[in-house]
Amino acid sequence: MSPLPAPETAPPAPAPRWKRRLATALKAAVSGTLLLVLARRIDWAELRGMLDRTDPAWLALAVAAGIAPLAVSTWKWRILLRATGRPLPFGRLFNLYLAGLFVNNFLPSTIGGDLFRSYEAGKQVGGQEHVLASVFMERFTGLTALTAIALVAFATNLSSFRDPRFALALGAGVLVYVAVALAVALPGPLAFALRRFPGGLAGRLIGKLAAVQEAIHDYAGQTRAVVAALALSLLFHLGAMAYIAVASRAFGIVLPVRTLLVIVPVIMFVTSLPVTIGGLGLMEWAYFFTFGASGAGGSPGLLVGLLIRANSLLYSLWGGAVYAARGLRRPPPAESRRPPGV
């Protein structure tokens, strides 16, 4: 492992303003279209009836249950970051994770939450490319576990995939996973792009991506950390299924485990697509579609999705408040001088 480089002093270069505005406008159009379609398909009477029958105890439990997957993801990120010799305390990383969630939910036209939290962590421990690599690995190990769960669910529960849209969504998710894996594993395309654009903004950006790719490849020698991250990814997805099950019970919906194994991967694959403003409309549609196709009802599914969105906003507001109050810019603790390891 090379010595720690000096901390980065500037965030990743943003895209030109007109491109950001165009992307935001297109995402807003997709969000608006999906919400309009949903508004026309919702059974409003059924929705009001379910709201009247909401169980406060299960509702409170759902708010608490949503914290567990976030904590598991933070624990996983800490392990991967520590493996590079750049550890930070769990509490600080958890606050950064929630602050990144705030960026995703309330600042969709600037930078993503993952870039935000990697930049902030990089300012504290140095080696921005290694911190970015740890964030990527945190996400990629989660996608790996999700893909494995989806394939097992598909192979062992074919009868639940009668709606071809389920198979289509899972197939698209697997293709995205393969494409991401190849893009990271193969250095050739970035090397070619760097030869093609050796200077200017494009060259600097490609050079940064190549440095991050090299940092990701360093995890090949961190087997223990990667295996731990994969195990925690499975725990995360089990926690996500439990979270959705508890949120459903708040409105009197009981979901069998085999149903959760089918709909949760589809929901996660769909909601990870960066095509809307903060996932607005896409997340609601994903719950409406999957619950409806599984027999639980589209309108009840939408209600569950709205509860989970409300929880996400609540958690992110906490993260934004903590970041605003503390800045998360304190010097690294003594722990950062310990040798790397899990």
Image (spheres, rainbow, N blue to C red):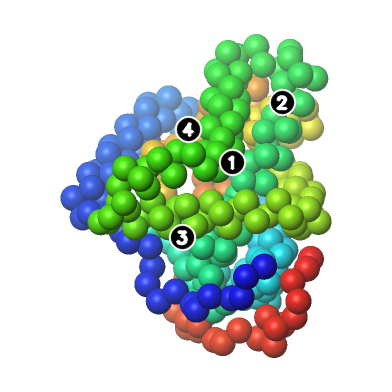
Q: Earlier in the sequence, mark 4 or mark 3?
A: 3
Q: Is residue 180 visible?
A: no
Residue behind mark 2: 151
Q: Earlier in the sequence, mark 3 or mark 2?
A: 3
CA distance separating discs 2 and 4? 23 Å
Q: Earlier in the sequence, mark 2 or mark 4?
A: 2
- Figure quadrant of the N terminus: bottom right
CA distance separating discs 1 and 4? 33 Å
Q: Secondary structure at mark 4?
A: helix
Viewer-side residue, 6 vs 332: 6
Q: Secondary structure at mark 3?
A: helix
Residue behind mark 1: 185
- Figure quadrant of the C terminus: bottom right
Q: Earlier in the sequence, mark 2 or mark 1?
A: 2
Residue behind mark 3: 115
Corner quadrant of residue 49: top right
Task: Say which residue appears at 52% left-offset and 43% top-offset.
Answer: 187
Residue behind mark 4: 285
Looking at the picture, does residue 146 appear above or below residue 97? above
CA distance separating discs 2 and 1? 22 Å
Residue type beneath disc 2? Leu
* Residue 116 drawn at (x, y percent): 45, 64
| Pair 2/4: label in front | 2
* Residue 33 drawn at (x, y percent): 32, 32
Q: Secondary structure at mark 2?
A: helix
CA distance separating discs 3 and 2? 30 Å
Q: Is residue 136 left or right of residue 232?
A: left
Residue type beneath disc 4? Trp
Viewer-side residue, 115 vs 272: 115
Q: Earlier in the sequence, mark 1 or mark 4?
A: 1
* Residue 190 drawn at (x, y percent): 44, 44
Residue type beneath disc 3? Leu
